[in-house]
Amino acid sequence: MDNASTDILIKKRNALIGKFLCGDEPGFIVKHTSVVDEYIFSVFEKSISARKMTVARTPFAIIALGGYGRKEQCIHSDIDLLILFEDTIPPEIEAFVQELLYPLWDARFEVGYAVRNINECLEMAFERFDILTTMLDARFICGASLLYTSCMEKFRSELSSKHLKNTLNYLFEHGEKRHFDFGDSTYLIAPDLKSGFGGLRDYHTLLWYAKIKANIKTRRDLEYYGFLSHFEYFSLEESLKDIWKIRNFLHYITKRKCDSLHFEYQVELAGLLGYQFENLQPDVEYFLGDLHNRMDFLKQINQITFEDIIRSCRIKKGTTEAIPTKTDGLIIKKRRLYFANTVVILQKPDLLLKIFLESGKRKIPLSIEARRIVSEFLHLVDDDIKTNHACIKIFKKILSLSFWEFNVLNVMLATGILEKFIPEFSALVNKIQYNHYHLFPVDKHSIRCVQIINSFKDQSESATHTLYHSVFKEVRNKNILFFAALLHDIGKSDPAKEHSKTGAKIAKPVFERFGFTSTGIEDAVFLIENHLALVKTATRRDISDEETAVYMANKIGKIRLLRMLYLLTVADSKATGPKAWNDWTENLLKDLFLKTMGILKKGELASKKTQRLIDKKKNEVIKLLKERWREDEINLQLDSMPRRYLVYVPAQGIVDHIKLYRNLKAKNFIWQISKENDSDIRTVSICGKDKPGFYSKIAGVFFLNGLDIVASQAYSFGEEHVLDIFKVKPPKDRIFEKEKWEKAEKDLVHAINDDHFLDKALNKIPGKIMVQSGKNPRPNTIRIDNETSSFFTIIEVFTYDFPGLLFSITNALYRSHTNVNVAMAATKVDQVVDIFYVRSLENDAKIENEQGLDKIKNVILKSLPQITAKEMNNEKNRSHHKAIQTG
C-alpha cells in the first residue's frame, strides 16, 4: 500500500484547508478535488496490479462520481469512485482496490466505490435512478479513457432513445419528495444546505436536466445553452460560492460531513464568516438573512427546472396554443400564465398585479418567463400604482386568495413586487429572529399568517377548526384582518424597539394610503399593537380566575375586535412554531376567547353560568361523600374553598382533596401522588398547614431531589390550610421512584421544621448562566402587574431556564415576606417566564406601595444567576480574521 502518496495527500489537503480557513483559497472545492485526483494518479501510476491488468489486456478506467465527479469536493465530502472494465473483471482488481482505498480509509476518508463492466453500469443506471444521476456526473480521472468514452456514449444513446421520459419524471417526482422530506429551506431558520428546497440539490437537478437535454459539459454551459439568462447565471455563481463556503465551514466545525445548519452551529459560523457586531459578537440574524437570500434564488432555479421538465414530458400535444384570459394582456400556455407581450405592460402596468390575481383565481402558476418580466419591470410600480384604487382592490383580492397549497403571496415576494407595492415590507425580507422560538424568517412568517387565516374559510372535522371557521364567518371586514396579518410584525424592522407599538405606527400610513375608513384604520392599528395580548394573557395569567376575562373584555371592548384578534393570535402562533403553538396553548386561548366573548355579549360577568357549574359540582361531591360525612359538614367544607378552585378542579378531584384534608389531622402536611393518564407526568396534591414559605419549601425539596416542576396551582383550604397542586416530571430512575418520593417527603418534613435545611439546595443554584446567542442575551427582567387582579399582585420573571429556577424565585419571595398563591410558567422567545400571583404575608393583601415592589424586584434579581453570552473560541476568531476581511 502506498502510504507515501497518502501522506502527500493529507499534507496538501491540510495546507489547502488552512488557506481556505484564512480566506486565501476562493476556488477551494475544485482544488480540493484536484488534490484527491493527484493521489489517485499517483497510486495508479505506481501500482503493479494495475500494470498487470493492462498487460493482460483487461484495462480499466477510474471514474469520479457524484459531487467528486462535479468537482465539488467539500472538506468532509464523500469520495465516490467507479472502476470500469469493458467486459471481464479480473481477480487482480481486489489487490488494486486495497492499494487505492485502504490508505484512504485508514486516514478516515469517506470513500465509496463500485467495480463494474460497461453493461452492468448501463443496466444498473436505468434500473436505479440514484445511480443514473451519479452517471450524469461521471468524470474521467485516469486509466483507459476509451472505456470511459465508450460507456458514456452508450449511456447517452440509451438515455435519449429509451429512458428520457422516465428519467425526467424521476427528476420531477424525486425533487417533490425531497422537498416534502426536508422542507423549504427558505422557510427554516435551521435549513438543510443540500437537500432542502433552496439547497444545493436544486442546482444539481438543473445540472442533471441540462446534461440530459443538451449534454452540457460545464456549469457555464447553462447560460450558453439557454437554460439560464446571463443575470440568472451570475446570481447562481454568487449563491453557490456563498453556500459552498458555508458548507465547508460547517464541515470544519463539526469535523464531519454535515448539511443541516443546526442552531448550535450558527453562532460560530457567523463569527467565522465575518458577520459581527461592533463588540465582535457574531451577528447570526444578518448571516442567516444573507443565506436565505441565496437559497431563495436556488429555489427559483429549481422552479425553472421543474417548469422545463413539465414542458418536456408532462404536456400533451395540442396544448401549446395560447389561450386568452378575461384579463386583456394575459394568456395561458401549457397551464402557465404569461404576458401576451412586454409592450402591453408598458401600456398597462397594472398587469404586473393582475397576473397574480389571475393566478390566484385559476390556481395556475406564473411561468418563469412571466416571473422574470415582473422582476425586470418593477420600476413601473410607482406612486400612481401604489395609490390607485383599482390596484389596491386587486391586491386585497390577492390576499384573500393566498393559501399554503397555492402561494400567490410567496411568488409576489420572490419577484420583488410585494415589497415594491408595500415599501414598508422590504425591511422584513429575509429578516431572521435568531432563537429556538421562531422557525421562519419574518417575511415568510407574515405570509404564512395570511395563509392560515385563509384556511379558516374551509370546514373541518376538528371541533376547534370549526370554531375558527364560524368566527371567521362573523368577521365583517375581512380585508382588515388580512392586512393586519400581513403587517402584524412590521415593527420588527427596528429590533431596538417594542415591535407591536412600533408596528402600529409604521402600519397606520399604509392603511391610510390604501384607503381604509377611519374605523377600519383604528381597528387595524389596535390589532397590530395588541396582537400578543390574548396569547400572553392566556399563557401567563390564571384564566380560571374570572377577573382575567373581565380584564381582557375591558381592554378589547368590542366583539368585532375580539373575533379578529382571536383569529390573528391563532394564525400568528401557528405560523411561529411548536414552541408557540400546541394543544395546551390552543385550549387556553379558546377558553379565554369564549369567556371574554361571553362577557362582551352580555355586558356583565357570566356569574350565573359559573354558579350553575359550581352548584352542579357541589351536588356531585355530596353524592360521592355522603356515605362518609354529613351533608352539612361537606357543605361547610365546600363553602370554605375558593371560587376559582371549585370552577377549575373536577368533582372527583375535589373529593380526593377533601379526603386528603380529613386525613391531615395533626400533621404539617400530607400528599398524594398520582399518574396522569397517557402522560409521563405526576400530579402531587399537597394539603398542609398554611405556614409562611410552604410553597417555596416544596419547590426546594423537589429541586433537591431532581424532580422537575412543570406547573402548579395554590389554593386556600379554609382559614388555616392550603392545597398546592404540582405537575412534576418523575425521577429519571423509575425503578427507585417510590424510594425517591419517600426521601422527598422526609426532606419536606425537615424543611418545614428547619428554615435553614434548604440552604444546601440554594448552594446548588448556579451563579452564572452561559447563553449561546447570535446577539447579546436578554437581561433578567421583573415586571409587576397590579391591574389584572383585584386580589393579587402579579409578578412576571423573565430569565433563562436553569435547574432550581422556581425554588430560587419563591425562596426570594418568602424571604421578602411575600406569599405565593398561584405559579405559572410560559415562554418568551428563547427565555422562560415564571408568573406568580402573590400577596403580602404581613397584611394578607396586594402589594401596592412602590418601595415594597422595588424591594421584591431587587430580591428576585439577586436570587437569579448572572446571564452572559457563551464566548466563541477567541484564538479561532483571530486565526480567521483574514477570512473575515477577504470573505
Image (tube, helix red, strand yellow):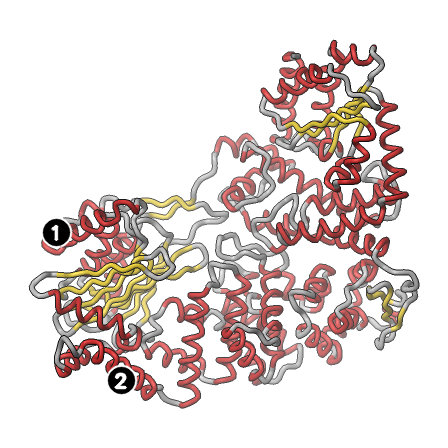
Q: 10 Å neighbourhood of mark 2: few (<14), some, or many (≥20)?
A: some
Q: For numbered disc 1, what is the local secondary structure? A: helix
Q: Position of residue 408 (x, y in %)?
A: 71, 66
Q: Nearer the viewer, residue 373 or 584?
A: 584
- Residue 258 visible in the snapshot: yes
Q: In the rendered view, would you say 392 is above or below 92? A: below
Left or right: 182 as drawn, with respect to 773: right
Q: 10 Å neighbourhood of mark 1: few (<14), some, or many (≥20)?
A: some
Q: Position of residue 316 (x, y in %)?
A: 88, 60
Rendering quarter of residue 6: top right
Q: Nearer the viewer, residue 69 or 84?
A: 84
Q: In the rendered view, would you say 356 is above or below 757? A: below
Residue 655 — which label? none
Left or right: 564 as drawn, with respect to 644: right
Q: Residue at x 47, y 47 (%)?
A: 773
Q: Which residue is mark 1?
A: 750
Q: Which residue is mark 2?
A: 615
* Residue type highlighted by circle 2: Asp
Q: For numbered disc 2, what is the local secondary structure? A: helix
Rendering quarter of residue 715: bottom left
Q: Residue at x 61, y 70 (%)?
A: 450
- Residue 353 visible in the snapshot: no
Rendering quarter of residue 492: bottom right
Sequence-earlier tag: 1 or 2: 2
Q: Position of residue 677 (x, y in %)?
A: 35, 62
* Residue type highlighted by circle 1: His
Alpha carbon distance from label 1 to label 2: 40 Å
Q: Quadrant of the C terminus?
A: top right
Q: Quadrant of the N terminus?
A: top right
Q: Position of residue 293 (x, y in %)?
A: 67, 52
